[in-house]
Amino acid sequence: MNEKVVEILVYIMQEIKSTKQEIGDLELLSKDLIGKGYTNHEISHAFSWLFDRMKDNFTEIMKNKGPISPHSFRVLHEVEKMIITPAAYGYLIQLKELGLISDPEMEQIIEKALMLGTNQVSIDDMKAIVASSLFNLDGPIDNSNQFTNPLYQIH
């Protein structure tokens, strides 16, 4: 479920940035999301997280000013490039540009991806890592199409 909530967060932030306006009509946005197959619970959870998390810098994000530190860009180390697929890294960049994750959170997510103990971290793996990080889940991710690794502990 948390991965779907992250999808909703991405959708909301893309809508805000593309229309360059504040969230005025939550009901209309919710109807769009329900039409896309999300549940009321998932939508409510996403809005709740967004308003709780972003209350201090929400106005800044709404102004469509882009990333918090526009002059810096995280480049993967050669070892990281071997493990994290371009699609997975692109997903992280998208989340950072939308203001859903900070620079330190991006670093923590990359570290967790490297600790998976797999040859490659796909975009689906990255979505699971991000969801667990954003919602502070403890323990390994239990996902039927993902593997569970004892190294994959969220602290």
Image (cartoon, grey):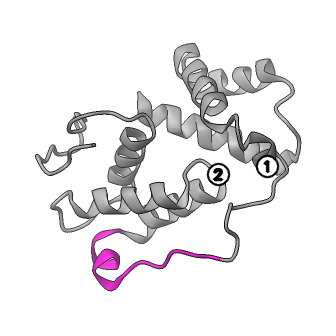
In percent of width and height, residue 58 lies at 74, 40
Residue 74 in the magenta stretch? The answer is yes
Residue at the far left: name it.
150
Residue at 58% of width from left, 14% of height from top? 40
Where does label 1 land, which residue?
60
- Residue range of the region highlighted in magenta in the rendering: 72-84
Q: Disc 1 residue type? A: Glu
Quadrant of image for the C terminus: top left
Residue at 27% of width from left, 43% of height from top? 154
Q: Which mark is residue 33?
A: none
Residue at 65% of width from left, 27% of height from top? 33
Tell me the SS state at disc 2.
loop
Quarter of the rendering containing residue 9: top right
* Front position among marks 2 and 1: 1
Quarter of the rendering containing residue 48: top right
Q: Disc 2 residue type? A: Gly
Distance from the alpha carbon under mark 2 to that under mark 1 = 10 Å
Residue 22 in the magenta stretch? The answer is no
Taking the image as shown, residue 62 lies to the left or right of residue 88, namely right
Please tell me how crowded label 1 is: few (under 14), some (14-19), or many (20+) other residues with Cα within 10 Å. some
Front residue of 73 and 43:
73
Residue at 70% of width from left, 39% of height from top? 56
Please tell me how crowded label 2 is: few (under 14), some (14-19), or many (20+) other residues with Cα within 10 Å. many
Tell me the SS state at disc 1.
helix
Vertical relation: 57 (above or below) 91? above
Whether residues under marks 2 and 1 lie with C-beta atoms below 8 angstroms apart, the answer is yes
In percent of width and height, residue 70 lies at 70, 71
In percent of width and height, residue 100 lies at 59, 47
Where does label 2 land, which residue?
99
User: Which comes sooner in the sequence, label 2 or label 1?
Assistant: 1
